[in-house]
Amino acid sequence: MDVLTQKDLDKEMLEKYNLNNCVNSTTIKESFTVRLIAYALILASGYMMKIELFNYALSINKAIIIVILSYLLIIPIHEICHYIPFKLLRYEPKLHLLSNEVDGAIKREDLMIISITPLIIISLLIIALMIIFTPYIPLLLFIIGIHLLTCINDLAQFSIAKKFQKGCYIGVANKTEYRGYL
């Protein structure tokens, strides 16, 4: 999907959806610094804590491997958890390994559901795994920490969508500016 400017988005909303009233506009700032600090903390906690699975403190190499494997496990599941509600709500998303895209505008309520779905589904799945496989709880806590980090942008998107009026359509300009249309 091409990066739309404000003007292009306004034009597309008018032509495609007959929505010509931009009622609200806000931006999301992706903070990679916050994420890097959080990843470092998780890596350090994995290094310092004893994981019963290994029966000894993790070496830094094993901690890095667990972080990478956890990421490789969580991200595709996370994106599939976005893809399913997109399809159920009759949008045509483009599924990528690290993201989903949809052309055009999304209803506010739909965006809220789509953005929060992975947090709910994956968290419940990991909690169920903790109940079933109690010896692996420390490792699963490590994985749920990484999962929660992948949900940071989703929670920001949910928060932004919540600021718009009920029933409005939300489009994205310049990859970071959310604009609401009635």
Image: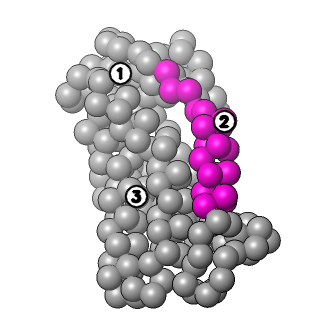
Sequence-first disc among 1 and 3: 3
Q: Residue furthest left?
A: 166
Residue 118 disc label: 3
Image quadrant occupied by the C terminus: top left
Start and end of the magenta stretch? 27-45
Quarter assignment of residue 146: bottom right
Is residue 155 on the magenta stretch? Answer: no
Q: CA distance from mark 2 to mark 3?
A: 23 Å
Task: Please give the name of the residue rendered at 28% of the width and 30% of the height, measured from the top-left corner.
Answer: 162
Q: CA distance from mark 1 to mark 3?
A: 24 Å
Residue 180 disc label: 1
Residue 34 screen position, x and y as percent: 60, 37
- Residue 159's place in the image compared with 23, above or below, is below
Sequence-first disc among 2 and 3: 2
Residue 10 screen position, x and y as percent: 46, 16
- Residue 37's place in the image compared with 41, above or below, is above
Quarter assignment of residue 14: top left
